[in-house]
Amino acid sequence: MVCCKRFKDRVCVVTGGARGIGAAIAYRLGLEGCGVAIIDIDGEAAKYRFENLEKNGIEATYVKADVSAEDEVTKAMEGIHSRYGSIDVLINNAGIGFSGRELENQSYDEWRRVIDVNLTGVWLCSKYAVKYMKRSGGVIVNIASTRALQSEPNTEPYSASKGGLVALTHAMAISLAKYRIRVVSVSPGWIDTSEWQVPPRRPSLTLLDNLWHPAGRVGRPEDIAAIVAFLASDEAEWITGINIVVDGGVTSKMVYMDESLIFASLEVLLQDEELVELIKTIVERSREEGASVKNRLRSIFGIGNG
């Protein structure tokens, strides 16, 4: 719930602000009084978000730019400062994903592109925003990921970029402290961005997706926007140089792949406790009789081996 104008007369720049988490952050900060400047490589999506912000009474502008291209970043920051006269908050949110190919099949071009956008882009945007921010101080919030701390298979370029971003955060926090610029990073977990896409989509989540999280649900872009708004505000003036994980408790959860987890998952998916008990009984009796579960099911249902 937004209840104040704590960013009145301030200007924030949100990279990758046309969709997803970036769009939610732009909207939240705008509702709290910020003038919002979106930088996004997708000009049409940025225009859509700009119009949406304006419809909600938010002072906004947008610039089409690739955050990994130095000349485009320079011009974008110059243009935003020329329009508003200051840059007070920078949200480094722009990022791209990964192919999911196995390590030996990942291309050098893919590696370079992910690092260029997700890591070098943050360095570039910070470098050219600081030129203006250092005059009066400010806040930089970098959107990292829990992939900086834990990984799925075949995520090397993305995980490396986000791990580097967490390190870049504390490095910049120390370097920029003399200008009264705070730097923090936020590492979201699983965030369903469907409703913040262009155009918006309906979420497609299962009950199991939600119950996997100790908090009871998959995250929403609004969850990240809320913590970013706090970190960018004067209420967080003693917070700098750290990474904050916002993931519904998943990275704190120890998971053992055992039968209790499997049967609990089946109960959620099937929504039938009696059926799950029947499956459990079949598995237990098969184990006692030294038979395979498949053969016991064939016997029960009269299925032949052909």
Image (cartoon, rainbow, N blue to C red):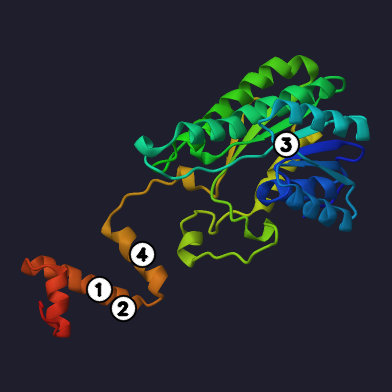
Image side of residue 176 versus residue 110, left or right: right
Q: CA distance from mark 1 to mark 3?
A: 50 Å
Residue 251, x across and y down, in percent: 47, 43
In the depicted structure, whether residue 269 falls above or below residue 253 = below
Query: Which residue is disc 4 drawn over?
Result: 264
Please state which of the two labelled residues, at mark 3 or mark 2, is closer to the viewer. Answer: 3
Label 1–label 2 contact, CB within 8 A? yes
Quadrant for the C terminus, please: bottom left
| Residue 91: assigned label | 3
Q: Amino acid at mark 4?
A: Ala
Foreground residue, 73 or 148?
73
Q: Secondary structure at mark 4?
A: helix
Image side of residue 26 versus residue 115, left or right: right
Image side of residue 69 versus residue 264, left or right: right
Q: Residue at x 86, y 40 (%)?
A: 7
In the depicted structure, whether residue 71 falls above or below residue 93 = above
Query: Which residue is disc 2 drawn over?
Result: 275
Label 3–label 4 contact, CB within 8 A? no
Image side of residue 235 versus residue 170, left or right: right
Q: CA distance from mark 1 to mark 2?
A: 6 Å
Q: Residue at x 59, y 64 (%)?
A: 203
Can residue 238 be seen here? The reply is no
Q: CA distance from mark 3 to mark 2?
A: 49 Å
Query: Which residue is disc 1 drawn over?
Result: 279
Q: Earlier in the sequence, mark 2 or mark 4?
A: 4
